[in-house]
Image: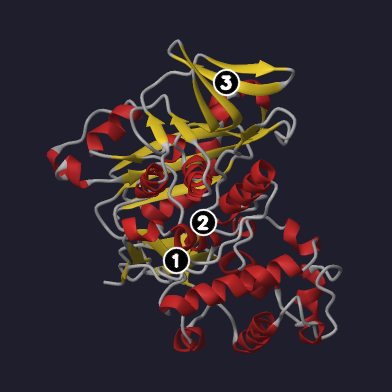
Amino acid sequence: MQEYDIIVLGTGLKECILTGLMSQSGKKVLHIDKNPYYGGESASISPLEKLYKKFKVRCPSNSMGRGKEWNVDLIPKFFLANGQLVKILLHTEVTRYLDFRVVDGSYIYKAGKVHKVPATEEEAQASDLLGMFDKRRFKKLLLFALNFDVKHPRTYQDVNPDKTTTRELFTRFDLGQDVMEFTAHAIALHSTESYLDQPCVETIRRIRLYSESLGRHSTSPYIYPVYGLGELPQGFARLSAEYGGTFLLNRTVDEIVMENGKVTAVKSEGKLFQCKQLICDPIYVPNRVKKVGRVIRVICLLNHPVKNTHEAKSCQIIIPQAQLNRKSDGMYIATVSTTVETNNPEKEVQHALELLEPIMQKFVSVSNQFVPYEDGKKSQIFVSRSYDATDHFETECEDIKDMYHRITGAELCLAASERHQSYNSDED
């Protein structure tokens, strides 16, 4: 019987990041996945024929080019250039395994038309998203957010960040509905309207993060791995291996062995592996998670750039829920995603799909969202949350940090390595 400090089930991005962090901190880690590939639910699919096979769709014609040249991410999410995932990559030095490119731009849907989210002062002045007076008010709010420091009350300007709601903050700056919607969904990246009646400190933090990320590259706040998100789990797996981590892929899990309500081992293909703690993807412990919603994702293959995006090679289009009378927001590969609210998920994303027409082929999936029943402190089984419908990694990183705290009892400190303070990006 082999003994480990931690066993990890599943090679999704969250699990692999935690594997790398735990191995780096000196823990003896064993990583098991029932699949023969890395990534789990968030894997990259290549060649293209495998994507058709996965969705049980007839194989592509020659017009799709060479299948091996395609890398399709099942759950694509952008990185904010100054966001938490980039900080984790710098902290662990996994950036040495990856190359990035800057996403060409961000767009927002308003009144039936796609508009570019301004990235420069010149673009802001020329944009028809906001009127002249709205632009002045928005600029005042932006300056307030950029100067705001929660540690220095003199920057509050009579705003109580923990008591003043975002609605009250927006009223203070005399923002109209258009500016509120633009700020909340295109800049602060809120996906519902619930933020309005919550303390404004979170919205201020999000505005700062967007602005700081935009300052890294000037054209866009978003970056993306050149060869797809599948590089990320593999990068953290390599990090774990450098520190002695062991990986067993394409291996079934027979049983999670418990003693007095606490995990003691994992049985895989008849072999017993002892452990003190267990980290796992929800799929491995269906009796320890509950369903809290569903997410629809539609992967679309196009032979043209998306209309009204200035022929951008890569971009994000935000469709605020108020534009479609919904509760939440919703290459050439284009992916549409949103939280499901009705019994007809595909109809919910119809407006977004119309922006992409003509579509050569689409692949539709509806996934359940799971969260763990308990925090794992008693059982020492720590389960990640399912991926949400957002198009960035900030909420997933919050889950990673929360799990890290529950597993180790310490906060995850993301100070970048002195040897690796930057990352490679291709802006062409």
Which structural element holds mark 3? strand
Q: Compared to 67, does 162 lie above or below?
A: below
Which of the two discs, 2 and 3, labels the residue nearer the N terminus?
3
Q: Nearer the viewer, residue 83 or 113?
A: 83
Q: Can you give x and y, in whole percent of width and height, for residue 24 in the image? A: 48, 49
- Front position among marks 3 and 1: 3
Which structural element holds mark 1? strand
Give the CA separation, mark 3 to mark 1.
Answer: 41 Å
Give the CA separation, mark 2 to mark 1.
Answer: 9 Å
Q: Can you give x and y, in whole percent of width and height, for residue 291 in the image? A: 66, 30
Which structural element holds mark 2? loop
The residue where tag 3 is placed is: 265
The residue where tag 1 is placed is: 222
The residue where tag 2 is placed is: 392
Q: Is residue 316 left or right of residue 158?
A: left
Which quadrant of the structure image shows residue 65?
top left
